[in-house]
Each structure stands twice: as C-alpha cells, then as structure tokens.
Image (cartoon, helix red, strand yellow):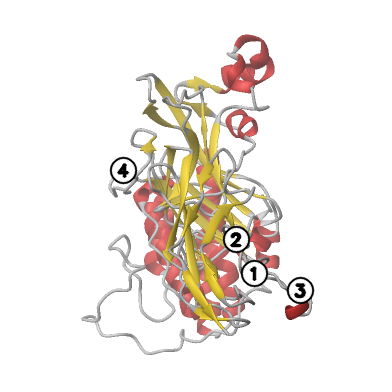
Amino acid sequence: MLPIAARRVLLAVTAVAMSACGEPSRPSAEAPSPLEPSLARIPTGCQTNDLASVARSYFSSPEQQTVTETLRAMENECAGADGNAVVSGGWTVLSTIEAVLGAGTGGSATDGAALANGVMKYMCRAQAELCTPIPAPVSADALGPQGIFAVRSADAAPIVAHGAVPFTDFGGSSNNALWGLETSTSWASATQVPMILFYGTPDVTTSIPVTDLSFGDLAFAMHTFPDVPGFRDGELHVAVCYQDPVELPTPGLADRLQREGTLLQAYTPACGTWWAGMTQVAGLDRVFTNLLHLVGRAVLPKSLFAAGGPPSTGGTPIEFSHFAPVAANPNGSLAFVTPPQDGTAGEALDPIRVEALSGSGTPIELVTIRLYVAGNQGEPAGATFCDLASTGGQACGDTATTREALSGYGTLAEFDQATLYKAGGYTICAQALDSSGSADFTFQEVCAPMIHIKN
C-alpha cells in the first residue's frame, strides 16, 4: 500500500475543478442522498465538523490526528474552491480507514461506515463524476470481520476479506471460505479509473436465484466508488478460496462463480498467499496458518494441492453486484433465442441470437459459438456462410461469443452479419467451439427450422 502522503500526491492529478461547494445550504426538508443512509449527518456547505466528530470516535492516535487535520484542510480547500485538494484529502481519509482495519485498531464498524459515506458524499460535491451513477452506500458489514474495504490505484496488490466465512459443504462438513479480488494488470487499468474504493460483504440478506447447485449459503455483494459501469475484459477477477477441499456432488459437477444469472469464465486465484496473509483464520492463529503453508504438501490431503494451490472458485466479471459459487451441471446445451429467418442471397440475415446453457439452464459467458449449414451436400452444393470470392476475403459472420449479462449484450451470442450466397432451403445449426467459457462443459448442438434464401 502506498504511504498516505504518496497517495495524496497521486490523487491530486485525478480530480477536476470543484463544482458545488459554493452552493447555498439546502433546505432541511430536502430528501437525503442515497449516500446518506442515516449513518452520519452530512453538513451543508463546506463544514466538516460532523465528519470530524465521527472520525474522533472511530480513530485513535496517530490516525485520529491525521484524519482530523485532513478534514480541516478539506474544509478550507472547499471554501477556496480547490476541488483537486478536496478529492485528494477524501482519498486520504478512506485509505486511513483501510489502514486501521488492517491493523485492527479501528473503532466501531458503524462509525467507520458513517465516516466513509460522509467523505464519499463530500468528495462528490467536489467532483460530480464520482457519483454518476450514484454508488451503493458502504455498510458496517463491509468493515466487519468478513467484509472488504480497500482503496487501490496503479498497484496490483490483491484485495482479500478481513476474515473467513464459515459454511457447510455438500457433504455436511464444516469449512471456511475467504473471498477477494485480483487483477492481471493493475487496478487502474482494469477499472479504467485512477483511484477506486472496493467494498463488499457476505450477502446473507439478498437471495440470489440459482439454477445450478449453490455452495450452501455462500454469496457476496461487491461494489465500487466510483461506481464503475464495466471493467476491461479479462483483467479483473473475483474468487472464493476454501480452507479445505470441497467435494462436488456426483455426477462430476463443475465449480463456477455465478454473477447473478450468469456463470463466469473460470479463474484460479493465488489462494495460498491469501491464507498466509491472514492474522486469524476461523480460529487458527498466524503461526499455525503459516505452518500449514510451509509443510502443507506433506501434511494435508493431496487434493488440496492438486492444482498447485488450495481449492477455489473464481471468475472474471465485467461489472459488480452479487456473486455466488455454484456446482454447475457440465452437460450443457445451446438454444436459438432468435432463430434464423428467410432472407436474400448475398444479404446479411436478420440477427440470429444463440444462448449457451449449463445442464441446469444457467447461461454461460465467453462461449464461442459457430453457425454452419447442415446437410450441405446436395443442391445447392457448397452453400456456406463464407464465400470469400463474394465477400472479398472479409469475415464470414458465422462465429460469435456469449457475454455476461450487461446492458447492450444480454447473455447471448449475436450474429448480425451471417450471409448465405446461394438461393435454396437451408437448415442452420449452432455448435460450441473450445473457449475459456466452455472449459469443463460440453454443449449439445442445436439446429433451427429450415429457412429459404431467394435470389
């Protein structure tokens, strides 16, 4: 983690001119912002007295002095319309909350959440873009023993929950799950913002509908400030690591992470370093935990290290919300959601949409699907989607990839350039090609009703 002073220097270049600190006080009857979940009263104008009061309750020395001085400076900078410094100071306060959480010296989680929400709101007055869209409020559970609260920028340090979540596995055995995030590049690159706060909790109140078999009651809610609408494909990973091997029920189910209604691309995290860095893991002290990793290959079941590390379930999301590990039926299938329609030779067919599903019916992302013409031996012989002479060597439009549910994509593979170059009647089928999304899964091919192509 960067020192606080270094963070402030880095953050000074990320903010823009202040837009709202000079506004008049709002009427007391005005409805509170969603960033004010009754955790702390956010003052009007530039005052930080209430935030400083919560900070004094949450921090002890020397962090208490650092934060109160930072808040006082933010008030002066707000009054002087120095939006850069206001935002920089806010990140300093949020980073200090993370620091005392790691040291175990923070006050009540309720006070910490109140301070975080108040500071976020204050920062949004200096830079409205930070709250477009409005992020979810930080709950006290995010600062609790199983939550996540972490500020990241150009580094790539993994983000791990403060402690493990106990659960019962499929065989009725007690186990512990540690959840967190990793990036294959840097947090700034993966999130496409220079500085970001990750915060989340085990999700024990929101029921996530799952079609495949869920890992007990394990589920997690993950958010960011600012609320990033999407991450770079393949650069950010979320995962759950297990203290002991989890035996999946027969017949040979595949463990996957599900983000709400979609099975994510499989990912294997560096779980060994996650556990080794814990100060306390489900009652095991640091000495014993480190001992397990030093001699684990000799004293633990071979299955624990079969894949080069502790057992885990991971995935690559394109946005955040609710996650749950599931044991998915790998005997999958494909389905035409929008089947082919009649068309004209040499012209692109109306869009065709295909979905890849687990054996239990859950959509799967990043499965590459190919269209082909079935029974393509008679008249008109040789009719395919790829007539290079007609296309001038351009792509055929016969392959597409499913996506995780996101506005503008859904979970479908969409073919909008598929073209047949000969008149006749055709049966078009879909097959899954080897891809990161299809690992461990097989997909039964599917054919659509016959269509007719005219000249």
Residue 211 placement, left or right of 327: left
Q: In the rendering, at what x and y percent does residue 448 appear?
A: 45, 61
Foreground residue, 115 or 13? 13
Q: Are marks 1 and 2 in contact (CB under 8 Å)?
A: yes
Q: Residue type at mark 3?
A: Leu
- Residue for point 78% across, 75% down: 393
Q: Are marks 2 and 4 in contact (CB under 8 Å)?
A: no
Residue occupied by mark 3: 388
Residue occupied by mark 4: 204
Query: Earlier along the polypeptide chain: callout 3 or callout 4?
Result: 4
Q: Residue type at mark 2?
A: Tyr
Q: In the rendering, at what x and y percent does residue 321 appear?
A: 42, 56
- Residue for point 42% across, 75% down: 47
Mark 2 to mark 4 CA distance (whole Å): 45 Å
Q: Are marks 1 and 4 in contact (CB under 8 Å)?
A: no
Q: Are marks 3 and 4 in contact (CB under 8 Å)?
A: no
Q: Residue type at mark 1?
A: Phe
Which disc is residue 385 wearing? Answer: 1
State which quadrant residue 375 falls in: bottom right
How many residues crowd mark 4 within 10 Å: few (<14), some (14–19), many (20+)? few
Is residue 121 placed above or below 292 in the rendered structure? Answer: below
Query: Quick one: quadrant of the C terminus?
Result: bottom right
Foreground residue, 81 or 254? 254
Foreground residue, 256 or 279? 256
State which quadrant residue 383 falls in: bottom right
Mark 3 to mark 4 CA distance (whole Å): 55 Å
Query: Earlier along the polypeptide chain: callout 1 or callout 4?
Result: 4
Q: Residue type at mark 4?
A: Val
